[in-house]
Amino acid sequence: MPDPDAPVIVWFRRDLRLADHPALHAAARSGRPVIPLYVLDETPGVRAPGAAARWWLDRSLRALAGDLQARGSQLILSRGVAAEIVADLAEETGAASVVWSRLYDGGAIVRDTALKAALKDSGMEAESFNAALLSEPWALKTKTGGTYKVFTPYLKALRASIGDMSLHDAPKRLRAPRSWPSSDDLDAWALHPRRPDWSTGFDGTPGEAGAQARLHHFIDQDLAEYARGRDVPAGDATSRLSAHLHWGEIGPRQVWRAAEAAAHRRPHLQASADKYLSELSWREFNHEILFHHPDLATANYKPAFDTFPWSDTHTALAAWKRGRTGYPMVDAGMRQLWATGVMHNRARMIAASFLIKHLLIDWRVGERWFWDTLVDADEANNPANWQWVAGSGADASPFFRIFSPMGQGERFDADGAYVRRWVPELAKLDARYIHAPWTAPDEVLARAGVTLGQTYPRPVVDHDAARRRALDAFKGLSSPLTPP
């Protein structure tokens, strides 16, 4: 007869919450003791989080540990090769089963598939659940049975597929095992950035409570302005839920239901809610792409870009990373990123386009920098969005769409508020010149205390010349818009 005291191990990964957590819900309903486990995974082939994301992870794990403690439980921490740690803990504790939430990047799929088979071969149950997506990335098919390569029909199919939105409440108590296994000390993991530690100004409140508070603030205060104001970097109309969603402190079903409920209560919010749900669906689309293209962060989705003549201009790359390109909208975004660990979405597009098309630097270089410096760096969104800007991705912006940093600034930061905040050496410059300070008369620069080449750099490249160079490089590709 099965031992009723044999525990269930709940392996937490990027699902650091208790509510609407199918694996945890199943473990609690079993009536067995529950051992919550988090592994700082060092499996070869599994992409480790970047420095800024580890800062978020540190605080999120502390919040999760506190939430579990309030329910009579503990979070067990361990560091190393995840499959070995999980299997060893299952054997040590005599676990009846191991449950977890699915991940969709290639390294995780290989790891989890092998672990599930090994656990079952050892006589244990192993089950995975969907906690991260509205739809599994293999579920939606085109009329011909293929996968979606264009977002608009994907969005239509996704919205048609969404059915029951009932959510699981967080368990009130979790049954404890007879004894707790040993656990690492989170402080010993040293997840804070070092040499240098630039995390003092990082933005956000990691943890499930922070995610719920952010969602409620967005729905109550910012959703009404979302459709109109989401592209204004100086404003605060975006949801700022991306890091919470990446780490699973909140699930997309919870967010989707909250937005739809708000639009139902206040019909004037419908347009903004639809726009926001479209952006949430873009996240789903990116995960589908990642699932079917596990090398998304390292290989062009469109192979024609494999022959693109990228530059290796290290000086220009360093200027871009430091926010010293001489283009204020680019520099403002890059400085916001370094100071806070986040960057407004419009600024991300401007900065990415500049690196790829003005500097002709490989999108993968920028993707790796964002991976290390964004607290919301996501294994699907980050490479997919970089490839979208480059023109090499699915349903991508064409390469020949080259943003003018000046035009983008005039359109989305007309009074220069965003630039003035993040590029303070230009704070006193007249709005007419703030997005192109090199065009300002000497007396205007002098009154603003700006000396080009000293207090603020001259442009690292000429916009018109860079645009011509990029278009010439693009013309050399064969069938560049043909998807795989």
Image: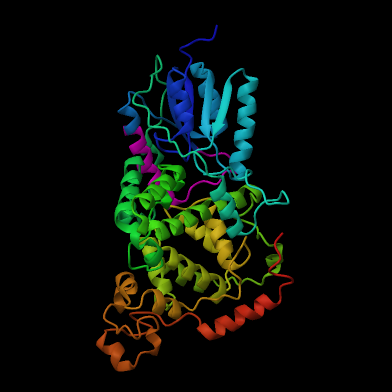
Residue 82: percent from the left, percent from the top?
A: 54, 33
Q: Is residue 172 magenta?
A: no
Image coloring type: rainbow
Q: Is the C terminus in the top left, top right, bottom left or bottom right quadrant?
A: bottom right
Residue 289: percent from the left, percent from the top?
A: 61, 52
Q: Is residue 474 above or below residue 88?
A: below
Compared across the picture, whether 292 is left or right of 374 comes to: right
Classify residue 482 by image quadrant: bottom right
Q: Is residue 459 above or below residue 77?
A: below
Residue 242: percent from the left, percent from the top?
A: 43, 52
Q: Residue furthest top?
A: 1
Q: Is the N terminus in the top left, top right, bottom left or bottom right quadrant?
A: top right
Q: Main secondary structure of the magenta part?
A: helix
Magenta-tinted stretch: 41-66
**Residue at 46% over, 45% down:** 252
Residue 96: percent from the left, percent from the top?
A: 53, 18
* Residue 341 visible: no
**Residue at 37% over, 69% down:** 232
Q: Is residue 60 magenta?
A: yes
**Residue at 54% over, 60% down:** 385
**Residue at 53% over, 39% down:** 42
Please state which of residues 194 and 482 is positioned toward the viewer in this rendering.
482
